[in-house]
């Protein structure tokens, strides 16, 4: 047994060294993903991508240790050692190595947690632990039954394809049973559905128990058939699948849900809005609502106030409440997309586009739809020109217009630029603006002339 212990430790070190390099590559590819910044839940979930490495290493290590124990033929002769003690002593170094790989990924991503006000989700951490354990015992059982040249590659293939393939199947419960789908979380205005985490824990935890029971058939000596052990393992596996399928039955293709707006903190502040001609005016600001940590540098409030007051000065009626979330809100509220690393111009653009909304789908000809789409694009171009000033330039987000299309709206765009410099709209442009906005929102309104 002493020789097995030394071999187990050596295998664990070798596998950890190899896996650590892969984990570094995986994690490094994610550190610049903007939406994982400043949000512990998102960072913890995104570290789940490394499960491809840690679970694969666990499966390979389990197969190696199973093959070593297979050669001792513990089920062929009586011995005083308990099966769980044998398995634990052989497997724990590999398990620690696989978990260390997962921890490395988390630590690399945690460098982007500055400003986060939440804490790592312990239930999600438990889910990752059970996933690694499931793959470890899967490989272990293969090693106990097959030759190393067969069990080791099969363990790796099974681990990789179960995680990777189940992640994209159309039968959604399988996505949540494999658990890799949990990494698809979360922007700061989103959260994980608890049912998704519980599904991963239930299936992988109970699946690991089933594998542990099944392994006893190769670790204990008995003259009697081991039918009872096999039946017990099968019953646990069936129960794991049934309960997990029930837990995930209501889940969609991704585990993400919107955070409750009750978690937001709202405030109204009066900002000075200045235009290019040096004029400074006060506008009655809207109520701005952010999730904790969503605007750590307090950069968004002034830009949102400025855009909101410009929309109001254009004669439009923007909602009095701005929520930094993508939740569908009521007529007197508007949502904007904002993450801790968004630029003020991006957030301002989001307010303009979300205020306008998407064009309604009407029962009309293709030619009529093309005109309606042109009306929408020209309206967004106009509003972005009119609300961009000083350091808040949002025109780069404007939907493209062909030269001939842009020429048709030259006078409107010229009025928008004049407005941005502190001027006012002429009556013709003001009428076009209101008519164009109504046409975006209703099929009953005819498109304004020129669209």
Image (spheres, helix red, strand yellow):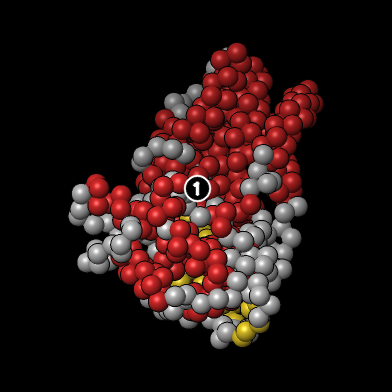
Question: In this view of the protein, which residue sits in the foreground, 276 or 291?
Answer: 276
Residue 302 visible (yes or no): no
- Please tell me which residue is depicted at 38% across the width and 72% down the height of the picture: 428
Q: Position of residue 121 (x, y in %)?
A: 61, 59
Q: Which residue is mark 1?
A: 200
Question: In this view of the protein, which residue sits in the foreground, 292 or 373?
Answer: 373
Q: Is residue 173 left or right of residue 416?
A: left
- Please tell me which residue is depicted at 74% across the width and 46% down the height of the picture: 108
Q: Is residue 114 left or right of residue 332?
A: right
Local crowd at mark 1 within 10 Å, few (<14), some, or many (≥20)? Answer: many
Q: Is residue 95 left or right of residue 357?
A: right
Specify the quadrant that holds the N terminus.
top right
Task: Count every numbered label the image shows and give the total.
Answer: 1
- Residue 193 vs 66, above or below: the answer is below
- Residue 39 vs 146, above or below: the answer is below
Q: Position of residue 199 (x, y in %)?
A: 46, 50
- Please tell me which residue is depicted at 60% across the width and 41% down the height of the picture: 49
- Please tell me which residue is depicted at 65% across the width and 43% down the height of the picture: 30
Residue 68 visible (yes or no): yes
Q: Position of residue 221 (x, y in %)?
A: 56, 26
Q: Position of residue 313 (x, y in %)?
A: 50, 79
Q: Is residue 29 left or right of residue 238?
A: right
- Residue 21 vs 318, above or below: the answer is above
Q: Secondary structure at mark 1?
A: helix
Q: Quadrant of residue 37?
A: bottom right
Question: In this view of the protein, which residue sits in the foreground, 210 or 404?
Answer: 404
Specify the quadrant that holds the C terminus.
bottom left
């Amino acid at each position: 047994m002493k020789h097995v212990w030394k071999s187990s430790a050596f295998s664990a070190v070798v596998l950890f060294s190899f896996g650590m390099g892969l984990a570094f590559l995986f994690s490094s590819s994610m550190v610049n993903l903007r939406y994982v910044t400043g949000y512990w839940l998102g960072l913890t979930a995104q570290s789940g991508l490394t499960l491809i490495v840690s679970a694969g290493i666990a499966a390979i290590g389990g197969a190696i240790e199973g093959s070593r124990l297979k050669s001792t033929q513990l089920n062929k002769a009586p011995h005083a050692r308990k099966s769980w003690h044998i398995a634990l002593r052989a497997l724990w170094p590999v398990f620690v190595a696989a978990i260390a790989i997962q921890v490395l990924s988390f630590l690399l991503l945690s460098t982007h947690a500055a400003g986060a006000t939440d804490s790592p989700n312990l239930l999600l951490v438990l889910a990752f632990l059970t996933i690694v354990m499931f793959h470890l015992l899967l490989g272990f059982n293969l090693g106990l039954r097959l030759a190393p040249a067969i069990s080791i590659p099969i363990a790796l293939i099974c681990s990789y394809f179960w995680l990777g393939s189940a992640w994209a199947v159309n039968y959604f419960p399988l996505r949540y049973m494999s658990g890799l789908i949990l990494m698809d979380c979360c922007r700061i205005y989103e959260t994980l559905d608890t049912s998704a985490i519980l599904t991963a824990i239930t299936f992988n935890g109970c699946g690991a128990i089933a594998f542990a029971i099944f392994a006893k058939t190769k670790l204990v000596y008995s003259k009697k058939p081991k039918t009872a052990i096999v039946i017990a393992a099968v019953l646990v596996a069936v129960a794991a699948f049934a309960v997990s399928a029930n837990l995930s039955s209501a889940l969609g293709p991704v585990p993400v849900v919107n955070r409750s707006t009750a978690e937001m903190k709202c405030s109204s502040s009066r900002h000075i809005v200045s235009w290019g001609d040096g004029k400074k005016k006060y506008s009655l600001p809207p109520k701005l609502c952010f999730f904790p940590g969503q605007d750590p540098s307090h950069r968004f409030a002034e830009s949102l106030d400025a855009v909101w007051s410009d929309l109001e000065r254009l004669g439009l009626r923007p909602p009095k409440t701005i929520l930094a979330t993508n939740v569908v809100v009521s007529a007197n509220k508007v949502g904007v997309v904002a993450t801790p690393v968004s630029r003020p111009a991006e957030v301002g653009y989001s307010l303009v586009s979300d205020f306008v909304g998407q064009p309604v789908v009407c029962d009309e000809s293709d030619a009529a739809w093309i005109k309606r789409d042109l009306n929408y694009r020209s309206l967004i171009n106009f509003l972005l020109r009119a609300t961009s000033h000083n350091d808040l330039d949002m025109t780069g987000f404007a939907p493209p217009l062909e030269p001939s299309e842009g020429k048709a709206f030259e006078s409107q765009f010229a009025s928008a630029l004049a407005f941005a410099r502190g001027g006012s709209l002429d009556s013709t442009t003001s009428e076009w603006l209101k008519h164009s906005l109504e046409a975006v929102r209703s099929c009953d309104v005819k498109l304004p002339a020129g669209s």
